[in-house]
Amino acid sequence: MKSGGRKKRLVVLMIFISAVSLLLAAALIGTMFLGNAIDVPLLRSENVYIVLILAVIFLVIIISMTVIVLRRGKLYKRIRERNARILAGEETSEDSSAEEGIAEEGEREAGSKSKETSESRFYMLTETDIRMKSYRAPNMTGITLKELCERFRNYAAAEKKLYYTPEDIRKFIAGMAVSRILIMQGMSGTGKTSLAYTFGEFLNNGSVIVPVQPMWKERTDLVGYYNEFTRKFNETMLLQKMYEANYSSEMYITVLDEMNIARVEYYFAEFLSLLEIPDTDKRWLDVVSDKWSNDPVKLNESGQIKLPDNMWFIGTANNDDSTFAISDKVYDRAMIVNLDRKSKEFSAPHTEGIKLAVWEWEKLVREAEEEYGVTARNLRRLSELDAYMIKTFRVSFGNRIMKQINKYVPIYVACGGDELEALDDILSKKIIRKLETQNPVYVKSMSRQMSEYLDELFGEGKMKSCKESLERLALGA
């Protein structure tokens, strides 16, 4: 009762002060009509507006304080009533668990908005939760890798008027089997972006095109960030697609357009590290610092989403003065597809796209590895070439490159290609490319000798791509 009396007296005092302020404001307004008839310096016309503004501000402060006191009084009254019920045995502390956080609720009412709002801070991801409840996985197609390549090539030509050689398509498909990161290189206008985008269309699961910006430096540039002012997460289309892919068994394509216009190892660093983890169930990408009760379903307790294993990141790269050189860290983890020239047009029949589940894709890859493994003869050749490279240039294949070769070659052959063609292609991109960092004068002096050694080891005229790469290095010295 005593505290209630103090509160009532405080409210009466505030009301009295408010009334005085109103009267003062009314008097000041009156002087605006009386002019200078009242000879009071404070109320002269040049001072009236300043005093009036101060009076109004003072009045607003008093009213706000009154409202806060009344609301906090209600809050503490509810706390006292709850404690009284507990002491009287009418309610236990467990029964009152629903009222835990009354203090936080009071602060919300006083102007501090709680993070536990009814509206999710992730609009796009929450919508995805609702939409994907009705998702149905695609049926098995029964397609082979060779048929996949032929059908995709015809689809691109007939439906999109895009023309690629069979070798280009084989390199693209085989590269996807080796790594979740591909880099499309070559002259402008050869269809680098179009190839990646069209493959998503062919799979009836449209690709996401992410135009990389020159100022990008970190993960948030790709996935978005939490806005403290709006208390919403600024989601990107890539984040939404990654989240959706965790519901789906289909293959997803993300195109990083002009990926080296910013430093790839900066904004893509976390992705590169996660994709190196062998256990795909441990690839969790940081999104926010914690999870709220109404956050999307597939956001874990640490505020992370799983990096989906059914998503491929395909970057297009140009090599000019406006771009950054791609580091060895990125090249070693990615597969490279060179599109150096435009292909000739050809006639193709109308071709429908397909729905290919990632589990069927993995099944095709496993079967190809078992059936078309690198032959013992070529494994011996690779061992000899490795020894030659170490002795001549101090460049070694390494475990990662050998693992990539042992996967790339069987897939390329299963797509309808030749084993030596596959070896020539991957060696030019993974081994010969490393000579770019060597002394250019020394590389030029040794290029002819190495070309002759390749002819001796693999057969004359068999390693065309490797020898062309050596010639370019020699000319650039």
Image (cartoon, helix red, strand yellow):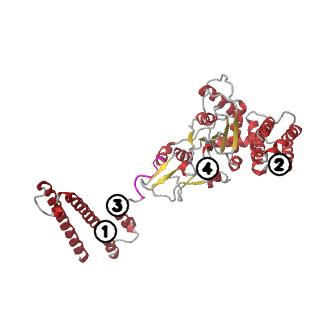
Q: Could you tell me residue 93's position as x and y percent? A: 39, 71
Whole-percent x, y for residue 174 in the image:
71, 39
Residue 363 in view (yes/no)? no
Residue under numbered circle 2: 393
- Return the residue at label 3: 111
Residue 421 appears at what percent x and percent y? 79, 35
Element assignment for label 3: loop
Distance in Å between CA atoms under marks 2 and 4: 30 Å
Q: Nearer the viewer, residue 383 or 315?
A: 315
**Callouts 3 and 1 close, C-beta under 8 Å:** no
Amino acid carrying mark 1 in the image:
Arg
Question: Closer to us: mark 4 or mark 1?
Answer: 4
**Of pointers 2 and 4, the one earlier in the residue sequence:** 4
Which-is-in-front pick, marks 2 and 3? 2
The residue shown at (62%, 52%) is: 269
According to the picture, the residue beneath numbered tag 4 turns out to be: 268
Amino acid carrying label 3: it is Gly
4 or 1: tag closer to the N-terminus = 1
Residue behind mark 1: 78
